[in-house]
Image: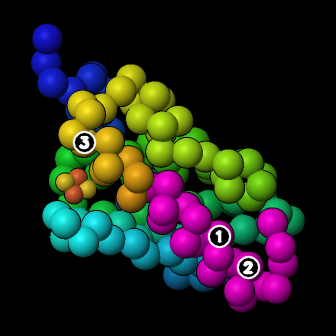
Amino acid sequence: MSLYSEKVMDHFRNPRNVGVIEDANGIGEVGNAKCGDIMKMYRKIEDDIIQDVKFETFGCGSAIASSSMATELIKGKPVAEAKELTNRAVAEALDGLPDYKMHCSVLAEEAIQAALKDYQDRTGKTV
Ligand code: FES
């Protein structure tokens, strides 16, 4: 059995939603102090719906796959729904991550929360 699921490999090799949103109104950047990996997430939110989301991740394959899956899971969804997305849900959607790589999915959850906080700070809205 290989260490990583097909879905992890697919999202690592062909990450979805990579890039920058120039007119984003919610940006979150987080890092893992231990491994030094960094994830930055951009969101364009209108009418409390995440119209677009993109990311840049400087990190390991699991972090890239987690970023990609997280963006797929929240794109087109209400902001309140994205707020509830956990790293476990991201890992499950990837058909699992090895235990010692679960922290990589935490980066995705933290980036979502950081982008949400930025959106709240900019707009004064509470989600
Ligand atoms: Fe750093 Fe995966 S090893 S996020």
Does 109 appear in magenta? yes
Check mark 3 vs ligand 1: CB closer than 8 Å? yes or no.
yes
> Mark 1: few, some, or many residues within 10 Å (few <14, many ≥20)?
many
Disc 2 to disc 3, C-alpha distance: 30 Å
> Mark 2: few, some, or many residues within 10 Å (few <14, many ≥20)?
some
Q: Is residue 112 left or right of residue 100?
A: right
Disc 2 to disc 1, C-alpha distance: 6 Å
> Residue shown at 21%/27% (left/top)?
4
- Depth-wise, is mark 3 or mark 1 nearer the camera? 3
x and y percentages locating residue 27 in the rendered image: 54, 77
Query: Magenta stretch: dominant SS?
Result: helix
> Residue shown at 46%/28% (left/top)?
92
Region in magenta? 108-127
| Kind of residue indicated by mark 3 | Lys
Total marks placed: 3
Callout 2 touching callout 1 (CB < 8 Å): yes
The residue that mark 3 highlights is: 101
Q: For residue 116, which numbered disc appears in the image?
A: 1
Q: Quadrant of the N terminus?
A: top left
Q: Quadrant of residue 55?
A: bottom left
| Kind of residue indicated by mark 2 | Gln
Between 51 and 127, the residue placed more toward the observer is: 127
Instruction: Tell me if residue 58 can be seen.
Output: no
x and y percentages locating residue 65 in the rendered image: 32, 44
Q: Which badge, 2 or 3, comes first in the chain's sequence?
A: 3
